[in-house]
Image (spheres, helix red, strand yellow):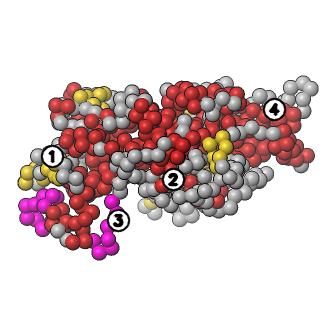
Amino acid sequence: MRPVIVVAVLLGACAETGPGDATPKGGSSDTDVERPADTDLPEPGPGRVALRRLTRSELDRTVRDLLGVDLGVRSRFPDDDATAGFETVASGLTISPLHVELWTALAADAADAILTPPFDAPVARRVEVEDGAFSVGEDVGQVHSEGMRLWDVGTIDGSLQVPVEGRWRVTLRAIGNQGGDEVVRVRLSVGSADPVELQVQGVFPTWDAHTVELRLPRGRVPVSVAFLNPFHDGKEERTVDVDAFELEGPLDPTPSPAWTRWMRCDPQAPPDGQDAVGCIADVLTPLVPAAWRRPVDAAELEALASLAAGVIDGGGTPTQALAFALRAVFASPAFVLHVEPPPPAEGTAPLPPHVLANRLAYVLWSSAPDAALRARAEAGTLDDPAVLADEIRRMLADPRAAALADDLAGPWLRIRAVDRITPDPITFPAFDEAMRASMKAAMVRMFDDLLASDEPVTTLLEGTDAWVDEVLAPLYDLPVDGFGPALEPVDMAAQGRRGWLTQPGLLAATSYPRRTSPVKRGVWVLTELLCDAPDPPPPNVGALPDDDGAPSTVRARLEAHRALPQCAACHEDIDPIGLALEAFDGLGRHRTHDGSLPVDTRGELPDGTLVDGSGELAAVLAQDDRFARCVVEKVFTFAHRRAPTDEDGPWIDKALAAARADGLSLRAVLTAVLTGETFRRHGGAR
């Protein structure tokens, strides 16, 4: 039975913009200017909120939290584009035909997860290769009544359907025609596990059974058998025949979280006094409000139950009927989109409680509200700033708040950029994937520390602790034998390192593959830490002078570039910041020389302030009023899912004042923004 496609959205609907979405720098202003009193502030409310879809990250977390299983959303959906610095901004979240196709497939998998009962013991399945699940190239083999034969170098390819994630036993049944002086050798590949080379000793009519045990994900897993040593000499030949695959497991049966959570009854065997449709309604009644993240009325539930009844009337089984209804739930716009009721045409009004709960949950957790948050919303008290602040404290203490390191800090503080760095292997032979992973993990730990502490956000710049393991130790000039595989905090004050600016991951992400980039580092600081992005370079700007082999430094080449009239203005702001970080190479290692010449980290900022090195730069930035305000502006943008406008400036300043009064910690900034009127209310287009 083909699933009904319930998603009915216009392509590009999520690209509808609210007022000012195309003005990313609008919220920035001179913090020395006296701000108006609260009575003079513009009417609160972000204007008409654009319809937007869940991001890939939000969809992944929502599915896992709702079902208790990982359906691999991140690997299945395309990356989201960043707008105004974040992937959550509505104006950048377009919808393509691919999204609709993937949502429909995900809906089917979510339904299957709920309908998969727990395994009390391993089960065995056998797949005959000649039954259509496998194929073989005509030039290297053939299909016959007993299976498939390979007579040349080639593969038999297919897949096995794994009903639940776990440890499984996969058995290959094969037989060899043992020509020549070698035993038949094959390579068995199952999923993403390392291939296993096997010797097929069996000769007709005895089939060899070769078994491997490995952990497999739920779903269809690719399998292939490669023939490694064919032989033909005109008199005899060496071939291999494959009969079947056997799948046994899970060898470590565990409860089925989605089944346990949502299957209140089995429609195939409903309780006494209830028919299959009544059982299906019982399953849907608590599930639909949780999936759609809002109250659901009786008519909506009846419509879904009617879909299921139609399947049964058409000859389908009760289980197929429930699967059909579940697919409708998960393919609905109510699940894949953030849907908010229309705001008032004029003025503002408090958000409906469930909408405020959704906004809060997707900022702090990138996922749906939990039962406790829904209860607060249903009680009608969530709009009270004191109650809201209490809920924010609870949610930040929950492990799900780890999403902030990914979705807020990931794009803002360049944590995600570490995934894309490509240091040149000749220039930086020490770099490998283990170092990439440790760089990123250390940045996450530093951000999580800041989020969990009462320290002011300036600690991000001036803190002296760094997280180090045996992989990162050489980058910090620390003995490797003093560390293990786990990250641990180390005070770097004696080494002159300060905060985020000297994180190896950031320094690598703001470098080129073969050298540092004072320009990339300076632009990042201005854009992400001061919210004062420089203008784009003019179209006739040139690159740095080529390295002609003569002794030189990046600084000297940059000074020659800055001498060009069209380049001078921008570089006056950028270069002093980037050059202050030149004591760290493209992997974040401290250095005293750039090639054979000494490194010079001195510079003069546009206001005349002299800085020499990362420590002095961090201190100057921490005292710059633009830094604290920029942190608030970044959180404001992330929370409101849109770029701030000039009208938002006073409200950003009000949030900054509230955060300062509360110690200016990152938690204080989040609380100030999320308890503010612009977050708690909605209004008509201005």
Residue 164 in magenta stretch: no
Q: Which mark is residue 536?
A: 3
Mark 4 or mark 3: name the one nearer the start of the chain.
4
How crowded pointer 4 is (Cα within 10 Å; few <14, some 14-19, many 20+) is rated as some
Provide the residue designation for mark 2.
647
The answer to whether any part of residue 37 appears in the image is: yes
Provide the residue designation for mark 4.
282
Residue 623 image offset from top left, x and y in percent: 28, 40
Q: Is residue 325 above or below residue 569?
A: above
Q: Residue at x 39, y 27 (%)?
A: 454
User: Three-letter amino acid code at disc 1?
Assistant: Asp
Which of discs 1 and 2 lies nearer the camera? The answer is: 2
Residue 435 image offset from top left, x and y in percent: 30, 41
For label 1, the SS is strand
- Magenta span covers which residues? 534-557
CA–CA distance in space, label 2 to label 3: 25 Å
For label 4, the SS is helix
